[in-house]
Amino acid sequence: MDENTEKALQELSEMSQKFEAAMKAEEEHQEQYWNSLSKEQQLMAFCAISRRIFDGEIKQGGSYRYVLYDVFGFGPEAYVPAQCAGYLDIHNAIFTGKDEERILKEFADYAKIDAEVLSQYIQRKYF
């Protein structure tokens, strides 16, 4: 490995450590805020947030950005903090029946299988 590559890797490692430290500090700040709320305030915040996630994710089927920007009204500055807080993982874990139908149809089209026959097979085998 040449000197320039080693230097670049070292700088990348340092930047990564700084990013992780900043995100850890932000998480601690957020937790301090949460703990400063009464249980009643925590529940009110939780319900308001859950309602918005339900609306954006389940009712509207929005993308990660859509929910952050259009449902919550945040700007691009919310993308990384929300991701670090786990919201992108939550968004990606939400899988609806509509998604299953779409994926099944895409697979059937790709594999040149009759989608209705494949659907009937899955219904008999797994349900």
Image (tube, rainbow, N blue to C red):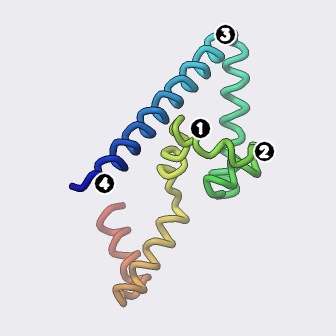
- Kindly identify which residue carries mark 1: 81
Graded by Cα atoms within 10 Å as few (under 14), some (14 to 19) or many (20 or more), the crowding at tag 4 reads few
Alpha carbon distance from label 1 to label 3: 20 Å
Quadrant location of the N terminus in the rendered image: bottom left
Image height of 126 relative to 68, above or below = below
User: Which mark, residue 73?
Assistant: 2
Alpha carbon distance from label 1 to label 2: 15 Å
The earlier-in-sequence mark between 4 and 3 is 4
Image height of 107 relative to 61, above or below = below
Graded by Cα atoms within 10 Å as few (under 14), some (14 to 19) or many (20 or more), the crowding at tag 1 reads some
Amino acid tagged 2: Gly
User: Which mark, residue 5?
Assistant: 4
Q: Residue at x 45, y 71 (%)?
A: 103
Q: Residue at x 60, y 19 (%)?
A: 29
Residue 37 position within the rendered picture, expressed as x and y whole percent measured from the top left: 69, 12
Residue 125 position within the rendered picture, expressed as x and y whole percent measured from the top left: 29, 66
- Kindly identify which residue carries mark 3: 36
Camera-side residue of 67 and 112 = 67
Residue 51 position within the rendered picture, expressed as x and y whole percent measured from the top left: 70, 38
Camera-side residue of 6 and 45 = 6
Q: Residue furthest left?
A: 1
The earlier-in-sequence mark between 1 and 2 is 2
Residue 21 position within the rendered picture, expressed as x and y whole percent measured from the top left: 47, 28
User: Which mark, residue 119?
Assistant: none
Q: Residue at x 49, y 26 (%)?
A: 24
Q: Are marks 3 and 2 in contact (CB under 8 Å)?
A: no
Amino acid tagged 4: Thr
